[in-house]
């Protein structure tokens, strides 16, 4: 059950629609979703929600709202925009769960009415405690991910010298399988003319490749959004593992931050380190639908909301559904107890009680995501 950051150690790439996040510094995602063995929407003829049901990886038991730690304290107005984005998609779905009624009613509520929003959920939803099927535990792994935000330029400058590349046009007609390694590509000249943008730091650029997407803040203030366009089909090799094997860092130190710090101390070895991973990721420009504060598009097909969107295992949690999450910040007593929306998924997010918490974009989000890997609990909200 890796996280995006675990990819750096283990070897997965997370190319979901949401850009490609780094999870805690050990996970990645794109999920193999399987429908529950008993669908959450399989209600009785009276229209009441079932008291319990199960899926392939989780069991669900109806509980009261009082079972949610911090429910009364959460500022639900901050979760409301994320729920309305879920409803944009859910109201159009035909399936076992009927979202139309609750989504239609959501449009009538003021966005800043926290108490009205709380009453809306309490009146229209049933809460289910989520447990892992394999051991019955109500506790699972919570990791974090983010979207890189780098400063850059559309042209090479004295500051911005590291290119991010589009998929080679020649490969669209005839692609070598597998393609050249990273080192071979960068020395061959094959990519000349395929530059989309230029950034300053080669390690940050490599992290964006691991994420699979990100944003570039251009010199005129515009935001260039880049998404995953393909790879050279070489196997992923962890650069963190490369450093560990050379005793440059200890395994318990492996993080995005420690890799960046090592690179600053050893600039002459950065190219060798990055070339240890033969895989190379190409980008494409995505529509710019907002500024730096607008999140990447998740698997649901809507922009993610910082600290209110999560990635889940779709065998457990229906895409788009509200989930109440209870965990804490790593190395801190500060709790995270809030309503979030299951708007993304990925192949490293596996299990009933399992979530990847989206922190947002940029360095501050990267810092929080890079150190997040702790236990937590989840409750699923479904229409009554």
Image: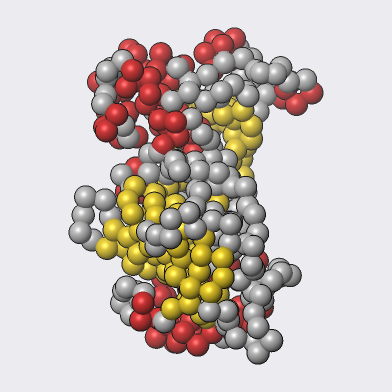
Residue most extreme to the bottom: 46
Q: Is residue 182 left or right of residue 138?
A: right
Residue most extreme to the right: 173
For residue 98, which quarter of the picture? bottom right
- Residue at point 39%, 51% (across, down): 141
Question: In which quadrant will I find the N terminus?
Answer: top left
Q: Is residue 366 left or right of residue 196?
A: left
In the rendered view, tell whether residue 212 sits above or below residue 53: above
- Asked whether residue 299 appears in the rendered view, the answer is yes
- Residue at point 42%, 64% (across, down): 378
For residue 239, which quarter of the picture? top left
- Asked whether residue 306 appears in the rendered view, the answer is no
x, y (%) of residue 58? 51, 60
Q: Is residue 183 left or right of residue 115?
A: right
The coloring applied to the image is secondary structure
Total tally of numbered discs in the picture: 0
- Residue at point 65%, 28% (across, down): 167
x, y (%) of residue 197? 53, 31
In the rendered view, tell whether residue 291 sits above or below residue 175: below
In the rendered view, tell whether residue 175 sits above or below residue 127: above
x, y (%) of residue 299? 60, 53
Front-most of residues 50 and 97 = 50
Front-most of residues 354 and 113 = 354
- Residue at point 33%, 67% (across, down): 337
Q: Is residue 372 left or right of residue 145?
A: left
For residue 135, which quarter of the picture? bottom left
Residue most extreme to the front: 135
x, y (%) of residue 138? 39, 62
Question: In which quadrant will I find the C terminus?
Answer: bottom right
């Amino acid at each position: 059950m890796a996280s995006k950051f675990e990819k750096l150690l283990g070897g997965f790439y997370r190319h979901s629609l949401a850009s490609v996040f780094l999870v805690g510094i050990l996970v990645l995602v794109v999920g193999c979703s399987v429908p529950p063995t008993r669908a959450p929407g399989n209600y009785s003829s009276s229209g009441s929600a079932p008291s319990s049901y199960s899926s392939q990886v989780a069991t669900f038991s109806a509980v009261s709202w009082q079972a949610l730690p911090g429910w009364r304290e959460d500022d639900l107005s901050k979760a409301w925009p994320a729920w309305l984005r879920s409803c944009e998609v859910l109201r159009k779905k035909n399936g076992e769960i009927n979202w139309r009624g609750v989504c239609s009613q959501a449009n009538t509520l003021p966005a800043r009415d926290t108490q009205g929003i709380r009453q809306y959920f309490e009146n229209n939803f049933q809460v289910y405690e989520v447990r892992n099927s394999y051991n019955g535990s109500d506790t699972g792994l919570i990791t974090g991910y983010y979207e890189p935000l780098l400063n850059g330029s559309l042209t090479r400058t004295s500051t911005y010298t590291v290119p991010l590349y589009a998929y080679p046009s020649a490969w669209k007609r005839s692609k070598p399988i597998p393609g050249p390694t990273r080192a071979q590509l960068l020395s061959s000249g094959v990519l000349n003319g395929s530059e989309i943008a230029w950034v300053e730091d080669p390690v940050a650029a490599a992290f964006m490749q691991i994420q699979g997407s990100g944003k570039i803040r251009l010199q005129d203030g515009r935001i260039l959004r880049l998404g995953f366009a393909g790879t050279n089909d070489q196997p992923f090799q962890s650069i963190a593992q490369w450093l560990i094997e050379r005793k440059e860092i200890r395994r318990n130190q492996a993080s995005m931050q420690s890799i960046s710090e090592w690179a600053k101390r050893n600039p002459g070895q950065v190219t060798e380190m990055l070339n240890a991973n033969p895989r190379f990721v190409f980008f494409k420009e995505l529509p710019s639908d907002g500024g730096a504060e607008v999140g990447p598009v998740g698997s649901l097909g809507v922009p993610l909301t910082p600290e209110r969107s999560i990635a889940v295992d779709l065998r457990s949690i229906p895409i788009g559904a509200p989930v109440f999450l209870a965990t804490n910040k790593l190395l801190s007593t500060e709790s995270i107890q809030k309503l979030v929306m299951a708007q993304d998924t990925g192949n490293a997010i596996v299990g009933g009680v399992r979530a990847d918490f989206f922190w947002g974009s940029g360095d501050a989000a990267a810092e929080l995501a890079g150190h997040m890997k702790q236990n937590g609990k989840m409750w699923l909200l479904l229409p009554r």
